[in-house]
Amino acid sequence: MIAFILRRFLAMIPLIFGITLLAFALMSLAPGDFLTPVRAQRDVPPELIDAIEKSFGLDQAWYVQYVKWLGNVFSGNLGHSWTYKLPVTDLIGQRLWATFLLSLSAFSFAWCLAIPLGVLTAIYRGSLLDRVVSFLAYSALSIPEFFLALLLVFFAAQTGLFPLGGATSIDYDYMSLSEQFWDRARHLVLPTLALSIGSIASILRIMRANFLDVMAADFVRTARAKGLSAVRVNALHVTRNALNPLISSFGFAFSGLLSGALMVEIVLQYPGLGQLMYQSILREDQFVVLASVMLGCVMLVLGNLIADILLAWSDPRIRLEKKQ
Amino acid sequence: MGFRLLMRQIYKRPMGALSATVLLGLYAIALFADFLAPYPTNLQDLERTYHPPTAVFWKAGALQVQKYALVDPSEARYEAIAGQGTRLQFFAKGHPYRLLGLIPCERHLFQLADPDARIYLLGSDSTGRDVFSRLIYGARVSLFVGLLGISITTVLGLLIGGLSGYFGGRIDFLTMRLVEFMMAMPGLYLLLALRSALAPHFASDEMFYVIVIILSLIGWAGTARVLRGMTLSIRQHQFVLAAECMGQGPVAILRLHILPNLLSYLLVAATLSIPGYVLGEAALSFLGLGIQEPAASWGLMLSQAQDVKVFYLNFWWLLTPGMAIFLTVVAYNVLGDVLSEHFDPKKNVAKDSF
């Protein structure tokens, strides 16, 4: 198992190199460089500009710049954000955490709701519940996340039940610890809903189809014939087997979440990585763009890695196959 | 497999008939937008901002459009003036245009008799432009991005996937690593990065093509991978071997023997991935990185709905472009499901997602 994880970990490295290289090449296609916005600002000392120019090799070809940038990244220096006047590492630290929190809450919400619903609709196939849920799932798959987010903001503004945006209230810093927790949770409700409804629908549909497939398998009939109760058969034998294919879509779902989070964060003004990247693209804050693309991809690759590990853990066939 | 036969099969199923009709209707609306829309895309009226949808009633033997008075400009509150209306004329003359881009024309489906009055079937936006007209013109961008994008993607995917599946070996290895790489990136991040790199090289009215290019550059990977797998398995068949023995070149074999076997998959996959393009364009334009004002697209129109004013004062009609996107996506998804059921009742095609 450890060898398997290590191997997957090593396979990650070229991917991350490739992604940053691509991002870098794209950046160099755009006019101007990292320092164009700064040179226009009067309050930045020219010595600082010179120092950055030298350390990132901005006067050289883009591949030289890439190598220098990589060197800087390895020593923990992601550059400087000109709009926020902060080192990028500090800036991204907060944002990454916020996006991670949002993705995690959307993810757990989606899975906790979709799996039981998928099982129920499969067991009571053709019932009213099944038909209503299937219809809702179908519509949910077709609704764009940002439109859903807009509708939710509309709802929040009309009813006043939830805050319209942001991750915390203004007086967050003066709250007690439990109040802070509730404040964050209240701000998370709408983004989580907007982000998770699409994944709930897709997980539910896959789960329902898998469950129906497995229910027809021989070993389920055997279990029934042995006299096991229907609940026991469904919960232990069918559900476990029906979950396997879903786990492999875990990584893919993660990618969808990350992309979706970008739109939801922008509409709901949630201060996450996606919003940061969008704003820095608009302001040509290139160090931030590069760093957020890189971290977004690292998050994605890690999600895929976790999916692989989970799958290997739940299905021994995969572990063995990879070894050969 | 003829096209007419396929259409008959689709129309045999109620869901298929419904979705195909909806889509045909939407594309017809987009094509005849100039005729159907009462106003051009950017006709402003700063006296009538955030105007609610106008009521239409029957009086004196003709359809009348209700007149409104602005009661409170700060809240954009309008009140109907009882009994006062303007006559609605059908096939009347309005602003000139070229039908289908060719035939010069002045007639519109409907116009108001009084040139000072306005008909707002779906209200007006922050500069008093008619949302209904913009919705109809916006359909052009939003709907044709999908068709154009999927055509480019399919050709790219077919070439890359087909060739690497046919030749195998080193080319195959390299392209498949590239495909995995493309699929490993979060779509929207790549979209934004590509947009910021490409956009400065184009004028703002060429944005439509930039968007199509970007979306196809991202989209080909999934198609190529599946097509490669299918080519690989079709290659094993005897008829390919026979064609090779007869001395046919690889391109001829791909075109004559392998492509026909991929057609049904291509059709289903294309139908199911068009929504991805529609949504991609909508997302980009929504962020202000796609189609630029004063042109109209559904995503761009929705970005106006982000104003806090819209939420508090309940200008619900500004959200109608979202409903249009939703309708289009649902119709394509249903049609895709019907098609995939028709071609292969057992298997489901995975959907591309951005």
Image (cartoon, coloured by chain):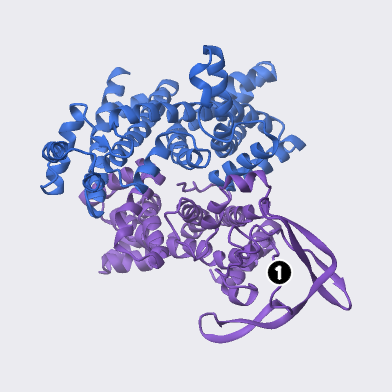
Chain colours: A blue, B purple
In the image, is residue A39 above or below residue B96?
Answer: above
Measuring from the top left, give residue A303's x and y in whole percent.
39, 30
Measuring from the top left, give residue B60's x and y in whole percent.
89, 77
Q: Quadrant of residue A271?
A: top left
Amino acid at circle 1: Ile
- In the image, taking residue B294 as reference, residue A307 lies left or right, namely left
Which residue, given by chain and number where applicable, does mark 1 sit on?
Answer: B119
Q: Residue at x 46, y 59 (%)?
A: B266
Measuring from the top left, give residue A153's x and y in whole percent.
61, 40
- In the image, taking residue A27 as reference, residue A296 lies left or right, namely right
Q: Residue at x 69, y 16 (%)?
A: A229
Residue B205 appears in view: yes
In the image, is residue B208 above or below residue B111?
Answer: above
Q: Quadrant of residue B105?
A: bottom right
Binning the other alpha carbons within 10 Å of mark 1 as few (below 14), some (14 to 19) or many (20 upward) gives many
SS category of the residue bearing label 1: loop
Residue B238 appears in view: no
Q: Residue at x 21, y 29 (%)?
A: A77
In the image, is residue A286 above or below residue A6?
Answer: below
Q: Residue at x 67, y 20 (%)?
A: A225
- In the image, taking residue A260 as reference, residue B15 lies left or right, namely right
